[in-house]
Amino acid sequence: MKLYLYLAPRQLDVLRHARLHFLAVKEQLDPWQLNAKMISRQSVRISEGEFQKELERQFKALPEQLKGLMTWEAFQNEAAKKRPKIEAQMKKRKQGKPPVLPNPQAYEELGMCRFFARADNPLLWERYADQHRGIVLEFNSDYPKFNTQKQVLRSVVYGQQRPTADHPMKPFPALFHRAAEYATEEEIRLIRPLNEAKDSKPLSNGQPVYFYPFPPRSIVSVTLGVNISAETREQVERILSYDLKYKPGRTLREVLLDPDQFKLHLRGTL
């Protein structure tokens, strides 16, 4: 599988030291994953017709000895006194058992790295590559040693329905489902245990970043953003030209704009 990692210029450490940056899942503050404050589920309404049908059902279910002692009218009058209780029972049956959401505590010891399915997505270049000033690394996830036994690599599923704890997707369904509005990202997530990281250090905001080495030959190409600075471009070219772990060299590409459409093109550099 081809994976594309968007990086800002300050993240060239990924290429320089051949190590992926992971953030702890619990530190990313995705409110859907963390089950942030929610409204109550929409209440079920019981119509008059439904209530009357329920009374008829209950009356028909009375033992024969009781039916002879109570008329339908008398049963209705008694049921009217207990209407709130009867409706509560009806609502409970109608709603069914409320679904249980995945427990975010299950993700406390996990880290996540976000890859994507394309290298020419303008939204991603702006959002994750410092407004087109960064780079994109293309990985071959099938390369030996890129995969480990303790990881999950999976494409994100987009939709409006939140996954439940018993969702058939195993493991960690909440980490691989997002709202439909994010579908244009085409994200592919890599999840690994934090205790498998080789090292870590705090960012300027105090949030720790965890480092996981990757085989340098798993990089297929490097793409330069259309707004990349001369300094960042020179750093990337120097790494690919002189760093022995990338010998023989890797394909170097650059982004060019389409003259007629809001579209990006990837072209090899000379």
Image (tube, grey):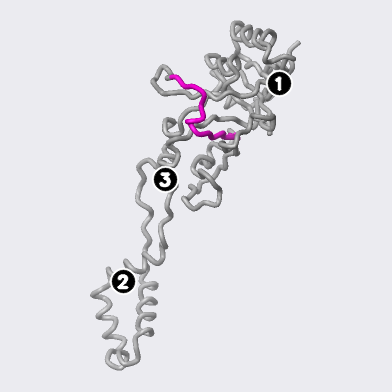
147 shown above or below 69: above
Q: Which dot, 1 or 3, sits closer to the camera?
A: 3
**Residue 62 horizontal/vertical position (percent):** 34, 85
**Residue 257 horizontal/vertical position (percent):** 67, 19
Q: Is 9 in front, or is 143?
A: 143
- Quadrant for the N terminus in the image: top right
Q: Is residue 22 magenta?
A: no
Numbered-mark total: 3
Please tell me the numbered disc located at residue 266. Answer: 1
Q: Residue at x 41, y 60 (%)?
A: 97
What's under tag 1, amino acid-wise? Answer: Leu
What's under tag 2, amino acid-wise? Answer: Ile
Residue occupied by mark 2: 86
Q: Judging from the image, what secondary structure is the residue with disc 1 in?
A: strand
Residue occupied by mark 3: 103
Q: Which dot, 2 or 3, sits closer to the camera?
A: 3
Q: Judging from the image, what secondary structure is the residue with disc 3 in?
A: loop
Please provide the residue range marked out in magenta. 186-201
What's under tag 3, amino acid-wise? Answer: Asn
Q: Does the CB distance between marks 2 and 3 fall below 8 Å? A: no
Q: CA distance from mark 1 to mark 3?
A: 42 Å
| Sequence-first tag of 2 and 1 | 2
Q: Residues within 10 Å of mark 3 (few under 14, many from 20)?
A: some
Secondary structure mainly formed by the magenta segment? strand
Q: Quadrant of residue 264?
A: top right
Q: Is 197 in front, or is 206?
A: 197
Q: Quadrant of residue 249?
A: top right
Would residue 20 be found to the left or right of residue 68 on screen? right
**Residue 260 horizontal/vertical position (percent):** 70, 23
Q: Is 37 in front, or is 4?
A: 4
